[in-house]
Amino acid sequence: MIKFSLFLLSIISFSFTSTYANYVLTLVQDDFDVYTAGKTVFLQFYTPWCNHCKKIAGEWRKLADEYRNDENILVAAVDCEHEDSAVLCDDFGIEGYPTFKYGDPTDLREYEGDRSYRALSKFAKENLKPSCSINAIHLCSKEKKELIEKFMSMSMEDLMKIIDRVDEELEGLEDEVEDKIDGIGEKYEEIMGKYVEETTALKKETKYDVLKTLRAAKAFEEIKEMEKEIDSEDHSEDHSEDGSEDYDSEDDDSEDYDSE
């Protein structure tokens, strides 16, 4: 229950983690699942010192703005030099900058086309279609639909227990690899290859990616319910107050915030 509360708290405060750098949502590891849950994505992996990234920044901002309020598609970025998102870049095998990937967040494909806004926008319109997800379950295969419905029927606590158990197994595999590679140079690639193979198999067997996506979705549902309760309480308080004075902004001595 404590872990669930901490996770829910992290979701509530996620807007303070990821940022809209230059008006483009920049994702970090902790809230990647939250923002991408149930969406088809188009991501730019970059670094602040990359000149090519700087040159296309304006084009990417236009594309991000085009899909800013879309419920099914997310256009965002990942800063591979930032300590909170470097792991994401490693997980997705990013080796050069900028790198563009699109599609299902759990199975991204690389975009290698032109980087002008016109080309990016055309590609997005033709390829960023709603896919099997919580928001578009009608597009799922029978097997995937049954899996999603099964997990969605579970409580958040039960989902957390399964995810925590898989996380412990993944951490165990990671510790085992670190012990093996200490002082070993020539066998590094062999050990790491086996590690990637084992962790990939474990995630596939336990439906780890689906579990994490559904956890984020269920957390949002609970937050919405909390917001409704708060709004209802505030509304009741407003009607119950008698004789309250109107706030006169002209009597306030505080200075106005100058956005300029």
Image: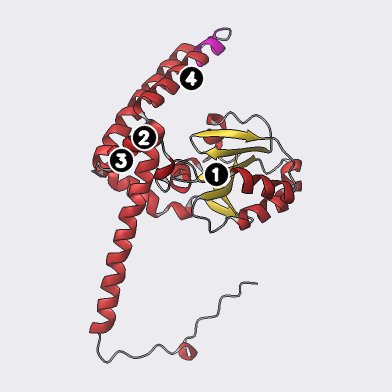
Task: Name the one closer to the observer, 174 or 119.
Answer: 119
Which of the pair 14/258 is nearer the observer? 14
The kind of secondary structure the magenta stretch mainly shows is: helix
Residue hosting label 3: 149
For the residues labelled 4 and 3, the Cα–Cα distance comes to: 29 Å
Q: Which residue is mark 2?
A: 142
Dot 3: few (<14), some (14–19), or many (≥20) neighbours within 10 Å? few
Near mark 1 (Cα within 10 A), the count class, few <14, some 14-19 or many ≥20, is many
User: Which label lies toward us, 1 or 4?
Assistant: 1
Q: Quadrant of residue 86?
A: top right
CA–CA distance in space, label 4 to label 2: 29 Å
Disc 1 versus disc 3: distance between alpha carbons? 23 Å
Q: Earlier in the sequence, mark 4 or mark 3?
A: 3
**Which residue appears at 29% of the width and 41% of the height?**
3
Measure how far apart labels 1 and 2 are at the Cα level: 23 Å
Distance Cα–Cα, label 1 vs label 4: 24 Å
Q: Secondary structure at mark 3?
A: helix
Q: Of circles 1 and 2, which is in front? A: 2
Q: Is residue 189 magenta?
A: yes
- The residue tagged with tag 4: helix, strand or loop? helix
> What is the number of the mark on residue 196?
4
Q: Could you tell me the amino acid type at mark 4?
A: Val
Read off the residue under disc 1.
41
Q: Which residues are magenta?
A: 187-192
Q: Given contact means CB atoms under 8 Å apart, are the residues at marks 1 and 3 in contact? A: no
Task: Between label 1 and label 3, give the one nearer the viewer.
Answer: 3
Counting from the top left corner in percent of width and height, residue 185 is at: 57, 10
Q: Position of residue 254 (x, y in %)?
A: 50, 81
